[in-house]
Image (cartoon, grey):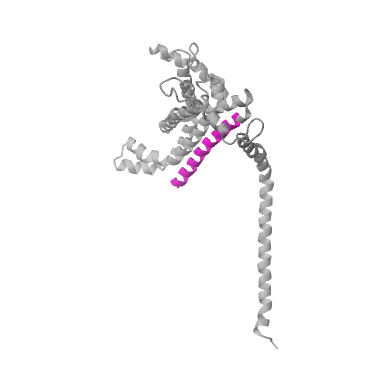
Amino acid sequence: MWGTAADRLSPTLTQHQWEKKAMRSQRWWRRIGRWVSFLGFAGPALLLILFLIILPALQTIALSFTDKQGAFVGLRNFVQILSDPDTLNLSGFPPDPPPWGSIVHNAVWILIHLPLTVGLGLGLAVLLERARGATFLKSIIFLGMVTPMIVGGVIIRFLFDENAGIVTAILRAVGLTDLGRSWTAYPETALPALILGSVWLWVGFSMILYSAGLATIPRDYYEAAAVDGAGPLQQFWYITIPSLRPVTMVIVAMTILWELKIFDIVYTATLGGPGGATMVLALQMYFYAFRALEFQRAATVATLLTLFTLVVGLWFVRTMRSAE
């Protein structure tokens, strides 16, 4: 009458399987709906990135491995670029004045500009943290950051001009008459003039980030350190600097990337001169592409510049992961 146990259980098992199938179908449709929503919102931006950034970058890399006829030449373009004195010239480095090659000029830019901007940015952020009128002073310092770099290059040229420059006037006033000439007109002073001038244009960036970082440090740390007898310098060294390490990593990475792709300041201030003494990688790439019309050589320089930036990016990612 009631049937076997298997007969009695089979309708229940069948219904359970149907419910599981229905739930899987619902999850599948919900997943499709999320992807449709994502593509609807992000699709246009992804297409622009694909056609305006990714594909041109891949074409540039491919172009760096070909000659003017489009034939594959392997690493020949890279060997020619790196053996060109315009790119790397260490024969007189460092006792002789520039040119030393665009790669060396970018490296010198990083070695001088990076510690100055990081150190000055941190110092200004600490000094102005509780100063009266700090907002106004920070705004004045940050003006360099919002100034177009094309305009910044013109300003740097005037700052170090023999007749109109305030820097050269101050140097002559303190007795340094040899340095009172136009810095951008001489190979031994043109590159330092651009580097020192660019500090003003970028130091506002590091100052603002450090100011934001200082606001996140709990005041209890300093109060506890003061109770234990730590002075201001000890508090700065053992509390402020370690607490700002993530901010410092961001500033260092962004600054190096900016220094590697520096172009507009050099273009407007010196055009890479005098005699190639201020030539940098980005300007060299521009000259190859739009003056000499050697697009393969320009693509090779662009690929080298991309590799350098990737090294910085990978270093930053690894450093931030280790900090976590």
Q: Is residue 1 left or right of residue 209?
A: right
On the question of residue 136 being in view, the answer is no
Q: Disc count in the image?
A: 0
**Measuring 35% from the left and 37% from the top, which residue is drawn there?**
237
305 up-or-down from 320: above or below: above
**Residue positioned 69% across, 51% down in the render:** 36
Residue 129 lies within the magenta run:
no
| Placement of 319 over or under 138, stated as above or below | below
Location of residue 249 in the rendering, given as x and y in whole percent from the top left corner:
46, 39
- Taking the image as shown, residue 21 lies to the left or right of residue 280, namely right
Q: Position of residue 195 (x, y in %)?
A: 47, 24
In magenta, the rendered stretch is 297-324
x and y percentages locating residue 274 in the rendered image: 51, 17
Q: Is residue 308 magenta?
A: yes
Q: Nearer the viewer, residue 248 or 208?
A: 248
Residue 51 lies, with reference to residue 168, above or below; the image says below
Whether residue 73 appears in this view of the structure is yes
